[in-house]
Amino acid sequence: MDFGVLFNPFSGGGKARNFREYLKQKLLKTDKKFIWIETKKAGDGTKITEFFLNRGIKKILVCGGDGTINESVSALAENKNDAHIFILPLGIGNDFVRSIKLNFTPEKLLDIFLEEKYAIKSVDCGKINGNFFVNNCGIGFDGAVTKLAEKLRGTKDPYTKAALRKILFYKGFKAKVRIDGKLKANGNLLLLVISNGEYYGRGIKITPGASIDDGYFNILIVENVGVMKRLPLFYSVKKENHIKREEFKFFKGKEIEVDFFDKSVDCHTDGLYLNLSDVSRISMLHKKVKIAYSLKGDKK
């Protein structure tokens, strides 16, 4: 078997379904042998990847968005293997692929995949309470937005709607944050972002300079503020000049411990909702998974 195809037909609000027939016909015209499996519900991406690994398949074409990538990476990180994934971005945000050097159209990427004109790289991932992430983990405001957006799924632009509501009504969360054993925050926080990649929120460079293979997280902490102060903060994020504002505190580290004072705190891992309580530990797993990263011969 040459490769497995993990396809999420729900990605991109119809984008994936529209691309499905083109992809199938393109693959069938080759002499490649492959297994095609589609997801039907949350968590299927991990199970499908595990199935491929158990069959000895070492090349997996992952077709979907950041959540689909997360589920596939979770299986790779959990199991000792020599497999790699090639990402065909068909989601809405597609933020993780902005941190690799194969950021082309799906049609172009498919040609690169079939002609094997790509180089593989081992990249980092994170783990929080048994859940993996390869791009970023957002605690607090970001998690609350993700939770509400899931309820608004099926409406037009659910994430923007959710973000606007939470800017007005999110209460923040109380916690202590330690990075590599040193206390960095203690009080009422608005958000905590632990990043492996630079981008989130559909192309916003939230943690400039983050690298997916340097063995360190780039961490952003923002203390809670009133509604009127939140608006200029989020506007600065949108314009990507938030690094100039004192409210945004940036750190680097490998191990983060968050001690929550609240019973329940919202979180997301690569856009997948997660509920946290008590103490959460976020660990760096250096060069844990292999992905198609760049064109062959690209020295940049």
Image (tube, rainbow, N blue to C red):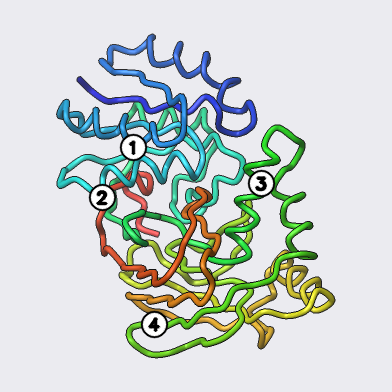
Q: Does 155 sit above or below residue 288?
A: above
- Pointer 3 residue: 149
Local secondary structure at mark 3: helix
Counting residues from the N terminus, which is met first, the one under dot 2 or under dot 4?
2
Counting residues from the N terminus, which is met first, the one under dot 3 or under dot 2?
2
Amino acid type, label 2? Ala
Q: In x, y percent, where is residue 132?
A: 35, 54
Circle number at residue 179: 4
Mark 2 → mark 4, Cα distance in angstroms? 23 Å
Local secondary structure at mark 1: helix
- Pointer 1 residue: 46
Asked if marks 2 and 4 touch (Cβ < 8 Å), the reply is no
Out of 233 and 275, give the one closest to the viewer: 275
- Residue at the (20%, 29%) spot, across then down: 57
Residue extending farthest to the front is 263
Point out the frontmost of discs 3 and 4.
Answer: 3
Residue 222 lies in quadrant: bottom right
Q: In x, y percent, where is residue 158?
A: 72, 43
Local secondary structure at mark 4: strand
Disc 1 crowd rating (10 Å Cα; few below 14, some 14-19, many 20+) is many
- Pointer 2 residue: 77
Out of 54 and 1, give the one closest to the viewer: 54
Amino acid type, label 4? Ile
Counting residues from the N terminus, which is met first, the one under dot 1 or under dot 3?
1
Out of 265 and 93, give the one closest to the viewer: 265
Q: Does 49 sit above or below residue 281?
A: above
Disc 4 crowd rating (10 Å Cα; few below 14, some 14-19, many 20+) is some
Q: In x, y percent, where is residue 85?
A: 32, 39
81 sits to left or right of 204: left
